[in-house]
Image (cartoon, rainbow, N blue to C red):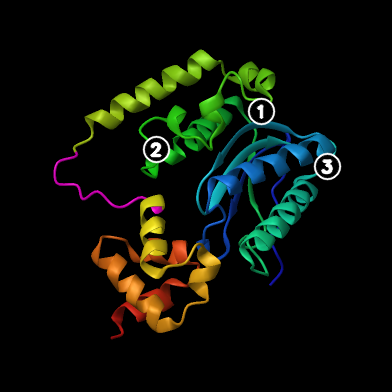
């Protein structure tokens, strides 16, 4: 089945998303996040694109980017090839790391740009990784006003730093008004991943995937009892959810 043509933006600005294959982790350790940003900076100098924001999560990432001398396809071919080669070398794995090709969404108005920027900054908060956008280390929001990788002059030409902060204050106010009584607090991906490694004795996803099914099943059942969801188990292990569910049922 042929791929649908990518929708082009009249402004050359896009919200780009990349996800790990089978939704597995693409960043396992702090070094991985740093290395990806290093490659992104390297390619930025080659491709001359403008970067308005980035947010790197455990198994996916978001970028707010403007094409210049090279199209998105070439930019992410360069970035992906560098990072996947390095990641596979580091973790002793082979094959694909990212799920299919990147996704891109055209941004053609200032209002929509501001909405997407807020969504990107709020991603770690919604995932339970931090209380405020400015607290998350691997999002450009933390360095806002002094982020070398981001083209802040162009960013603040669309929305000022004061407007960004005021928007976040309003969002935080709504968050505190939400009822929390009776909510079950789920484990974060970082906590669940740490427990998965401790229970299995491995250091990374590749090591876990090499374990025999009986050992994987034992770890899955143990973590499930500790409140880790099936979706998290699949995402953190890189093993399909159907297989995870089957292993959790076996004895």
Q: Given contact means CB atoms under 8 Å apart, are the residues at marks 2 and 1 in contact?
A: no
Q: Residue 56 versus residue 94: which sits nearer the camera?
A: 94
Describe residue 67's horizontal placement relative to residue 166 as left or right. Answer: right
Secondary structure mostly seen in magenta is loop
Q: Give the residue at mark 3.
A: 70
- Among the two numbered marks 3 and 2 on one chain, the one whose residue lies closer to the N terminus: 3
Q: Given contact means CB atoms under 8 Å apart, are the residues at marks 3 and 1 in contact?
A: no
Question: At which x and y percent is residue 179?
Answer: 19, 37
Q: Quadrant of residue 144?
A: top right
In space, the residues marked 3 and 1 are separated at their CA atoms by 18 Å
**Which mark is in front, 3 or 1?**
1
In the depicted structure, whether residue 240 falls above or below residue 55? below
Write the start and end of the magenta stretch as one range.
Answer: 180-189
In space, the residues marked 3 and 2 are separated at their CA atoms by 33 Å
Q: Give the residue at mark 1.
A: 150
Label 1: how many residues lie within 10 Å, few (<14), some (14-19) or many (20+)? many
Report whether residue 78 is seen: yes
Label 2: how many residues lie within 10 Å, few (<14), some (14-19) or many (20+)? some
Classify mark 3: helix, strand or loop: loop
Q: Quadrant of residue 151?
A: top right
Q: Give the residue at mark 2.
A: 125
In space, the residues marked 2 and 1 are separated at their CA atoms by 21 Å
Q: Quadrant of residue 228?
A: bottom left
């Amino acid at each position: 089945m042929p791929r649908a043509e990518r929708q082009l933006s009249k402004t050359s600005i896009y919200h780009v998303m990349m996800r790990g294959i089978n939704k597995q982790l693409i960043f396992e350790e702090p070094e991985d996040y740093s290395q990806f940003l290093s490659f992104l900076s390297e390619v930025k100098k080659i491709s001359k694109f403008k970067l308005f924001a980035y947010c790197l999560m455990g198994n996916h990432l978001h970028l707010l980017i403007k094409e210049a001398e090279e199209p998105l396809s070439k930019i992410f071919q360069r970035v992906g090839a560098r990072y996947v080669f390095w990641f596979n070398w580091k973790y002793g794995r082979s094959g694909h790391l990212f799920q299919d090709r990147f996704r891109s969404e055209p941004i053609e108005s200032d209002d929509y740009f501001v909405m997407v920027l807020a969504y990107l900054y709020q991603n770690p908060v919604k995932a339970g990784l931090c209380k405020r956008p400015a607290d998350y280390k691997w999002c450009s929001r933390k360095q806002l006003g002094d982020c070398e990788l981001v083209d802040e002059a162009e960013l603040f030409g669309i929305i000022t730093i004061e407007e960004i902060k005021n928007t976040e204050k309003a969002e935080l106010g709504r968050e505190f008004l939400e009822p929390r009584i009776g909510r079950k607090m789920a484990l974060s991906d970082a906590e669940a991943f740490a427990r998965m490694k401790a229970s299995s004795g491995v250091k990374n996803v590749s090591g876990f995937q090499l374990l025999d099914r009986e050992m994987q099943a034992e770890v899955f059942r143990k973590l499930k009892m500790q409140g880790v969801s099936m979706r998290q188990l699949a995402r953190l292990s890189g093993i399909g959810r159907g297989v995870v569910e089957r292993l959790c049922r076996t004895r």
